[in-house]
Image (cartoon, rainbow, N blue to C red):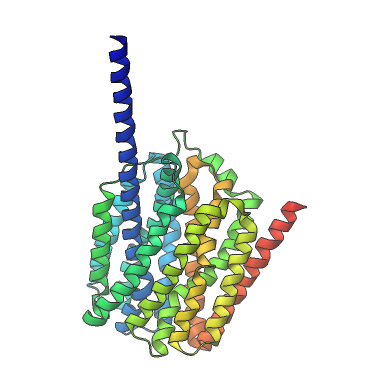
Amino acid sequence: MNSSKETTNIVNSVNHSTETTTGSALEIVRLKAFTFAVYLTTAVYVSYFPLYFEHLGYSKSEIGLLYAFGPFIGIAANLFWGVLSDRLRTIKAILLIVLGGQFASALIVQNVHTFASLFVTMLAFNFFYMSINPLNDSQLLIASKQLKRSYVSIRVWGSIGFSFSAVFVGWILSYLGAGRTLLVAMCTIGLTFLIGLTLRDRTASKQKFSAKELIAIIRSRQFLWFMLLILLVSTSHRINETFLGIYMAELGADSSLVGLAWMVSALSEIPVLFLLGKYGNRLKELPLLAFASAAYAVRFCLVAISHDPVALVATQLLHSISLGIYMVTAIRYLQQLIPDKYRASGQALYAVVWTGLAGFISGSAGGNIYDSFGAKTLYFTSASLAALASIGFLVTHLRKKM
C-alpha cells in the first residue's frame, strides 16, 4: 500500500512539474509575442510618423514641436502610469489601459485637419504611447526573474519586431501612401492588445509602496548623476530617431529605403543582445556605457559627413554597439539603484529622461538647429553630446575604483 501511495505521489509530482514547465514555456512565448507586437508600433511611430506629418505639409520645425511636446507630456504620463502600477501592484491592467488609449487617440489623430488639433491629439496619443515600453520592460524584468530566464532573451524579440515592422510597413506605405500610416499603427496596436489579454499579471513585490522611500532614492547624488549622463546620450539618440527619416528623404530616399535603414539598425542589435545575455554579467556596467556612448559619437559623426542615403543606411550598423549595448546595460545598472518593489516607478523615471526630457530637447532644439543650420550641424551636435556622456561614464567608473 505504501509503495502504491509513493508511486502515485511521484507520478503526481512529475505531472505537476510537467504542467509547470509547460505553463512557463507558454508564458515565455506570450511575453515574446507581446514584446514583438509592442515594437511593431514603435517602428511605425519612429520611422513613419515624421514622414506622415511631412506628407501632410508640416515644416521640420512643426514636426520638431510635435516630437518635443509629445515626449514632454510623456514625462507626466510615465510617472503617473509607473507609480499607479506599483501602488495597485498590477502591470497587465495598466498595459491594457494604455493600449486602449493609444488606439482611441490614433483614431482621432487620423481625422484631424489643422496643426492645432493635431498638436493636441498627439499629446493625447503620447500620454498613452510613451509608457508602453517602460511598463513592458518592468514586466519582462519581473517575469525573467520569476521564470528563471534572462531578460535579454525575451527583450530581443522587440528588436526582431522593430526590424520586421520597419521594412514590412515601408513596403505597405510605398504602395498605399504615407497617408495610411495611422491605419497601420491602429492595426499593430490592436494586435498588441489582443496578445496582452493572454498574459499573466505580475508584480515585483508584495511590500507596501512608500513614496517617502522612493523620493529618498531618486534624490541621491548617485541616481541624479546617472540620470544626467542618461539625458546626454538619450538626447543624442533621440535627435537621430526624430530626423533620420526626414534627412534621408531630403537626400532622395523613399519610404522603403527609410524602412531598410531602421531594419538594419534593429537587426544589428540582435547578435549583440544575445552576446550580452550570455556574457554581459561578466562585464562592468559603467565601462560598457562609456563604450556605447563613444560608439554613438562615432556613428553620428559619420552621419554628419555622409551625403548619400545608402551610406546613411550603412551607418545604422553601428546601432548594434551603441543602443544595443547601452539599452541593456543602463537597465542593469538601474536595477542596482532602484529596489524591485519600485520596479515600475524606476523604469518610469528612466523613461522620463530617456524619452520625455530627451525627446523634448531633441524635438524643439533639434528642429530649430536643422532648419537654421542643416543636418550636418545637427548631427555633429548629437555626436558631441554622446562624447560628453562617454567621458562622464568613464570618469564615474574610475572614481568608484579609487
Asked which quadrant contains residue 129, the reply is bottom left
- The image position of residue 15, as x and y in percent, is 29, 30
The total number of labels drawn is: 0
Quadrant occupied by the N terminus: top left
Viewer-closest of 279 and 218: 279
- The image position of residue 324, as x and y in percent, is 50, 64
Asked which quadrant contains residue 385, the reply is bottom right
- Residue found at x 23% / y 66%: 107
Residue 292 appears left or right of 176:
right
314 is higher (above) or lower (below) than 203: below
384 is higher (above) or lower (below) than 57: above
- The image position of residue 369, as x and y in percent, is 52, 82
Q: Residue furthest top?
A: 1
Viewer-closest of 68 and 25: 25
Q: Is residue 362 visible?
A: no
Q: Is residue 174 visible?
A: yes
258 is higher (above) or lower (below) than 137: below
- The image position of residue 300, as x and y in percent, is 55, 78
Q: Residue furthest right?
A: 402
- Residue found at x 32% / y 16%: 6
82 is higher (above) or lower (below) than 354: above
Asked which quadrant contains residue 287, the reply is bottom right
Q: Residue furthest front?
A: 3
- Residue found at x 34% / y 72%: 166
